[in-house]
């Protein structure tokens, strides 16, 4: 029977399945960070259990670690980071700690170091684990109880989710990025539209994306409620992985490629649902509301609750109130206070390049605070080798140490109440970037353009913007 | 660890009229810097507490063990701190139009029962609670049903394994570790 990519990976990882019970699913790679793991390690200790496969477990420090360098001033954060270090040392888990030259956001370093590979099951106590699906892996976020399960057994109990194909026909237009594509999808599906499903992204617009763009897309699968998002591996995938520190080498590489080539949805395989989106019609996007599904083209006007369906009217009105926006007003020209370029969605080298291309030789608008935070030490080094940090600094932006930074406002980086930020991160929930803060989600290009003009701007209208 | 089994819950309920309540609202990230699961009830909905009409802090809501809310409850971050905070605050069940996947799984693992009911039933419950905040609802896990204010019941469905775990206090890890030999065999394929 023809199978989907998801089915193939699922079937290959079912260890056991009793009638009426969820499957016991084997996990190939377990990524760990400081925020969602301490209670799991404590649970393990309470039961007197060991970590079953420390060799399949990789840890990093990203969420609560400050991005302004050591030492760490916040007592709670310091304790949390020390707890992770102790737990990793005790159980023999590889940790990319504060001093590591490969440390970074968990969803940046997994792929970058070659840990994430096609056909794997990948989990992490973090909902953006969906990022790793860009390699044709089944990758999803889990809670802390499940972190404990995986530490103890390398397995999880899972009900098989449904499958959703999101096919992007045609090609993206000039000046439109992977971020715009996925924001457009979230707007189309809604913030809960893919609940219960694993998305497979297909179509020419997806094939044309490089790996970093594919990661940006898969990263935000969860913002439509999906359990995971995945893209079948191809030559682009293999070229990215070749030579990465933890990717297979020599004969093992050749064997791996052979296996990986079969990781695609068979002709005639059935998805539970299919949504088709015309990529040629996608414009640079921005969010106006308080969830990632509330997105519009950057040139559009803020929608009116009166035009929304009865189910959405109240939520839309509430969002506009929080955001201090009026129905019908254009977002273009809206004054912004902060620009954040970073996060597991858009802090890879291509994102740094895209932002730098817009900001090169220009100055940040007076009164605007601009934070550029590379996703990892590797990204930071690569950017500095190209002189991108000088571009940002010369413009008047802050160039920081890697971490989650202002995406999550638990590490010292945050926006102030009432401020507006254009952010390349993935969540515009109330207070996500700081209590009372208001977030416009957008691409690195759009964020960089706002940094220069101090206003929401269509980057395509800036010289150098669309190049 | 073995949790107290979930039996029939009889309690007053409090209505939180909102859709897509994300886990950043349930517990903002700045409260995730601890290493414990305990004491999070006091920061449940931390940024909504100062609103004068915030339902959970109204005197009539005191002691309510049931939260009634909109659709897609618990979307966003996978933080299990969300159900920890809800349980620590005193909730044992959430009745919603629908739940986000990760939250639903996290909830049942912490003895918090997610009950998805259709829109019409939720509206009936909400109107009745508004009219009489002292109204007690009965959530009967065994029979998978919730009492209706005007008498009678409305059924809900729950994953049979999640139900079994909640009702017996069985913990999933114990179940998984029962497959230790199969896991070993899988690893040696
Ligand atoms: S960058 Fe933001 S979304 Fe990504 S892992 Fe960190 S906190 Fe989560």
Image (spheres, rainbow, N blue to C red):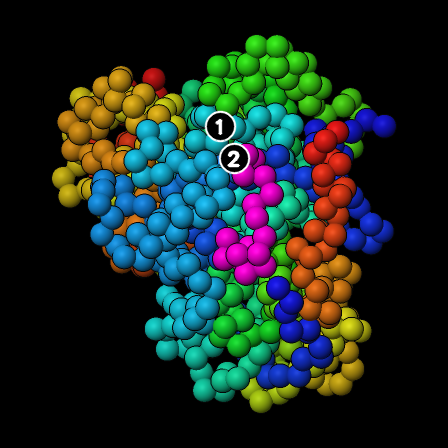
Residue A205 occupies quadrant: top right
Q: In this view, does A278 lie above or below A226?
A: above
Identify the residue at image location x=40%, y=33%.
A346
Find residue B159 and report its horizontal and vertical position in percent.
75, 59
Q: What stretch is highlighted in magenta?
A: A41-56
Identify the residue at image location x=68%, y=73%.
B5
SS for callout 1: helix
Q: Which tag, 1 or 2, sits closer to the chain's start?
A: 1
Between residues B106 and B184, which one lies in front from this camera angle? B184
Where residue A131 is drawn, which disc sits there? Answer: 2
Q: Do the residues labelled 1 and 2 touch (CB within 8 Å)?
A: yes
* Label 1 beta carbon less than 8 Å to ligand 1: no
| Residue B58 shows in the view | yes
Between residues A17 and A337, which one lies in front from this camera angle? A17
| Residue located beneath label 1 in the image | A111
Separation (CA) of disc 1 from disc 2: 9 Å
| Quadrant of the drawing holding the N terminus of chain B | bottom right
Where residue B81 is drawn, which disc sits there? Answer: none
Which chain is indicated by disc 2?
A: A
Between residues A106 and A4, which one lies in front from this camera angle? A106
Q: Mark 2 packing: few (<14 Cα in 10 Å), some, or many (20+)?
A: many
Magenta stretch: helix, strand or loop mostly: helix
SS for callout 2: helix
């Amino acid at each position: 029977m023809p199978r989907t990519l998801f089915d193939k990976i699922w079937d290959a990882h079912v260890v056991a399945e009793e009638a009426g019970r969820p499957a016991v699913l084997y996990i190939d790679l377990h990524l760990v960070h400081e925020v969602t793991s301490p209670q799991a390690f404590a649970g393990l200790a309470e039961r007197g259990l060991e970590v079953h496969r420390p060799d399949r477990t990789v840890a990093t420090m990203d969420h609560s670690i400050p991005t302004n360098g050591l030492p760490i001033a916040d007592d709670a954060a310091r304790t949390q980071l020390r707890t992770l270090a102790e737990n990793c040392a005790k159980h023999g888990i590889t940790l990319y700690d504060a001093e590591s030259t490969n440390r970074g956001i968990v969803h940046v370093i997994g792929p970058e170091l070659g840990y994430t590979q096609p056909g794997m099951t990948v989990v992490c106590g973090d909902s953006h684990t969906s990022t790793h699906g860009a390699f044709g892996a089944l990758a999803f976020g889990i809670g802390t109880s499940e972190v404990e399960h995986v530490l103890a057994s390398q397995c999880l109990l899972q009900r098989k989710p449904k499958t959703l194909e999101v096919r992007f026909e045609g090609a993206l237009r000039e000046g439109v990025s992977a971020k715009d594509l996925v924001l457009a999808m979230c707007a189309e599906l809604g913030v809960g539209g893919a609940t219960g499903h694993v998305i497979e992204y297909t179509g020419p617009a997806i094939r044309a994306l490089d790996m970093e763009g594919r990661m940006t897309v898969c990263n935000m699968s969860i913002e439509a409620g999906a359990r995971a998002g995945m893209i079948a591996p191809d030559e682009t995938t293999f070229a990215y992985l070749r030579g990465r520190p933890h990717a297979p080498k020599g004969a093992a590489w050749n064997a791996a490629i052979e296996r990986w080539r079969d990781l695609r949805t068979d002709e005639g395989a059935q998805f539970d649902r299919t949504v088709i989106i015309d990529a040629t019609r996608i414009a640079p996007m921005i969010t106006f509301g308080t969830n990632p599904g509330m997105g519009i083209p950057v040139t559009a006007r803020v929608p009116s609750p009166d035009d929304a369906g009865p189910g959405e009217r109240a939520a839309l009105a509430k969002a506009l109130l929080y955001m201090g926006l009026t129905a019908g007003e254009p977002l273009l020209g809206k004054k912004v206070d902060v620009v954040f370029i970073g996060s597991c969605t858009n802090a890879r080298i291509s994102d740094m390049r895209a932002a730098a291309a817009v900001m090169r030789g220009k100055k940040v608008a007076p009164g605007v605070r601009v934070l550029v935070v590379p996703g990892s030490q590797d990204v930071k080094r690569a950017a500095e080798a190209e002189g991108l940090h000088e571009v940002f600094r010369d413009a008047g932006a802050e160039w920081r140490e890697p971490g989650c930074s202002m995406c999550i406002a638990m590490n010292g980086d945050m926006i102030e109440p009432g401020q507006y930020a254009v952010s390349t991160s993935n969540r515009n929930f109330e207070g996500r970037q700081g209590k009372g803060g208001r977030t416009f989600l957008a691409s690195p290009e759009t964020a960089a353009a706002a940094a220069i003009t101090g206003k929401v701007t269509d980057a395509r209208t800036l010289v150098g913007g669309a190049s | 660890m073995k949790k107290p089994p979930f039996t029939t819950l009889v309690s007053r309920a409090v209505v939180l009229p909102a859709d897509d309540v994300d886990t950043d609202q349930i517990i903002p990230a700045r409260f995730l810097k601890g290493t414990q699961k305990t004491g999070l009830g006091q920061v449940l909905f931390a940024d909504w507490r100062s609103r004068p009409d915030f339902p959970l802090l109204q005197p009539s809501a005191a002691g309510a063990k049931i939260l009634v809310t909109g659709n897609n409850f618990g979307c966003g971050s996978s933080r299990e701190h969300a159900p920890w905070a809800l349980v620590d605050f005193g909730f044992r069940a959430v009745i919603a139009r629908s739940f986000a996947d990760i939250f639903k799984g996290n909830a049942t693992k912490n003895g918090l029962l997610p009950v998805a009911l259709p829109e019409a039933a939720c509206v009936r419950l909400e109107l009745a609670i508004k009219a009489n905040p002292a109204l007690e609802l009965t959530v009967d896990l065994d029979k998978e049903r919730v009492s209706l204010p005007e008498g009678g019941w409305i059924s809900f469905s729950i994953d049979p394994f999640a139900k079994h775990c909640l009702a017996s206090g069985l913990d999933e890890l114990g179940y998984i570790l029962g497959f230790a030999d199969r896991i070993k065999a899988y690893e040696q394929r």
